[in-house]
Amino acid sequence: MREPDLTYQLLRNLTSPVVAITAQRNGKENGMISDAAVRASIVPMVPRVSVYIHKFNYSHDMIFETGRFAMHLLHTKQLDVVRRLGFVSGRDRDKLAGLPHHRGVLGVPVLDECFAHFECSVANVMDTGSSTLFLGDVVAVGCGAAAGLEPRGELLTATYFRANMPAEWRIEYEAKLKDAQQVAAEMSRNIKPVVWKMS
Ligand SMILES: Cc1cc2nc3c(=O)[nH]c(=O)nc-3n(C[C@H](O)[C@H](O)[C@H](O)COP(=O)(O)O)c2cc1C
């Protein structure tokens, strides 16, 4: 590939909204950020989402082992949630402490404040070497504790986040991204077949 940087910049146009992904394993709760989530079904009776999660993130094994996660669309007033969940690992601290949430019907943490949330049961996975693509059956939805089923605010996209994050966050964000890209580069070609235990 001759122009990897140009290719990467063009691919950034394909990114999803910024989502918060939460999980729970053996009583330990966690959350992370992704901008690689999409709707994965056109069938209203079979609502599905998919999301790529790197294997080196703490959330990865929590989701792989439990087969459950919640995906939250965020609104543009929630940049602080992106920093809290997306800049440090839950291996080192309880990132959901102080972020109001409750347990959803699957037992996963659901943020009280969000644009919308989807509780998901993993239906299948695909290995990419560095990450796993999780395909989730949506089993419950909501729009935050106070809002009922009507999304409020403006949806937070990756483009909005990159353009509007406070200047003092940018160096940290870009350093973290670079580190992740380096580790992912080493793992990316080592794709393994994975058979998901269908329930
Ligand atoms: C805007 C943004 C987008 C991100 N997108 C992804 C992604 O698509 N997949 C992923 O695995 N990590 C992504 N990350 C990185 C994780 O959120 C980050 O590594 C987090 O600290 C992982 O937390 P954990 O180790 O507690 O699971 C993103 C971070 C930010 C700030």
Image (spheres, grey):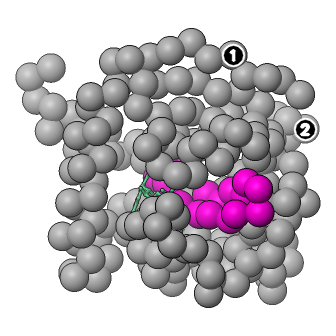
Q: Residue at x 46, y 67 (%)?
A: 92
Question: What amino acid is at disc 2?
Answer: Met
- Could you classify mark 2 by the number of other residues whose Cα lies within 10 Å: few (under 14), some (14-19), or many (20 or more)? few
Image x and y of residue 180, in percent: 30, 47
- Residue 64: x and y in percent read 66, 38
Q: Quadrant of the C terminus?
A: top right
On screen, residue 3 above or below 91: above
Q: Is residue 28 magenta?
A: yes
Q: Which mark is residue 105?
A: none
Left or right of residue 188: residue 92: right
- Distance from Cα at disc 1 to Cα at disc 2: 25 Å
- Residue 160 visible in the current orientation: no
Q: Answer few, some or many: residues within 10 Å of disc 1's Cα (few below 14, many 20 plus, some between 14 and 19).
A: few
Q: Is residue 122 rendered magenta in the image?
A: no
* Label 2: which secondary element: loop
Q: Quadrant of ligand 1?
A: bottom left
| Boundaries of the magenta span | 21-40
Quickly name the residue at label 1.
Answer: 195
Ranked by sequence position, the earlier of labels 1 and 2 is: 2
The kind of residue on which mark 1 rests is Val
In this rendered view, identify the residue nearer to me: 50 or 101. Answer: 101
Query: Which residue does the numbered mark 2 point to in the structure image?
Result: 45
Mark 2: C-beta under 8 Å from nearest atom of ligand 1: no
